[in-house]
Image: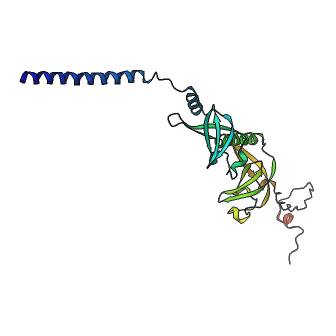
Amino acid sequence: MNEELKNNEEVTEEAAETVADTAETAAETMDDYADQIEVDPVWKNLEDLLDKQTVITVEVGGIVKAGVVAYVEGVRGFIPASQLDIGYVENLESWLGRKVDVVVITADAKEKRLVLSGKKVARAKAEEAKKEKIAAMKVGTVVKGVVESLKPYGAFVDIGDDLTGLVHVSQISRKRVKTPEDVLKVGDEVEAKVIAIKDGKISLSMKALEEAPEEPAEEVFPYKEDGKASTSLGALLRGIKLD
């Protein structure tokens, strides 16, 4: 009887070892071939678009809650309303059927989640256009604008075409100005000269357009050269009547 129990225990141990070996082998096999499982080429491409921030053009095909839908290579992509454009988008319906340049900001193959942004592209385009406009501007150009904000160090002036220049407090007037508020207020129309363009910033001067104050004329004393030199006190006092 004891011999039979011993044999049963040995069989049980062997079975357990076999099961353990089989599980370990299966795990090794899964690990060995995990990197060989074929990745969906469409999602792989979407991930590449995300990594490289490649700009693509899509067409808005539907309106959903808080955004719109557009398809990329047959995959449904979501563009949140906050990512459609630089400014606030009030009417989503007006975007239906429109083509939008976007970049991928989320590409989750596991969750089948694709999120796009048109705002990032629009902002980059606006910044590039602004750089080109500033580069085309020349020092010495006289511009007209509207004061849009006042700071302790100067006034920011909207000179049109989405450009803003700074009139430093020292460039507001030839007269001494302690603070911009002493002379200007928001909404004032002003004229100024471009005096510097550096690092994408425009410096303006209102003072440069003011006429310089006339200097008082020098008093001229009549002098007649008689060809004679005299150092006598009498010569110096001649002509002066003393009481």
Q: How many marks?
A: 0
Visible residue check, residue 166: yes
**Nearer to us in this view, 165 or 10:** 10
Residue lying furthest bottom: 243
Q: Looking at the image, is 117 positioned above or below residue 232?
A: above
**Nearer to us in this view, 3 or 205:** 3
Residue 16 rendering spot, x and y as whole percentages: 22, 25
Quadrant containing the C terminus is bottom right
**Nearer to us in this view, 33 or 12:** 12
Q: Quadrant of residue 130?
A: top right
Q: Residue at x 74, y 58 (%)?
A: 147
Visible residue check, residue 199: no
Quadrant containing the N terminus is top left
Q: Residue at x 30, y 22 (%)?
A: 22
Residue 30 rendering spot, x and y as whole percentages: 39, 24
Q: Residue at x 64, y 36 (%)?
A: 71
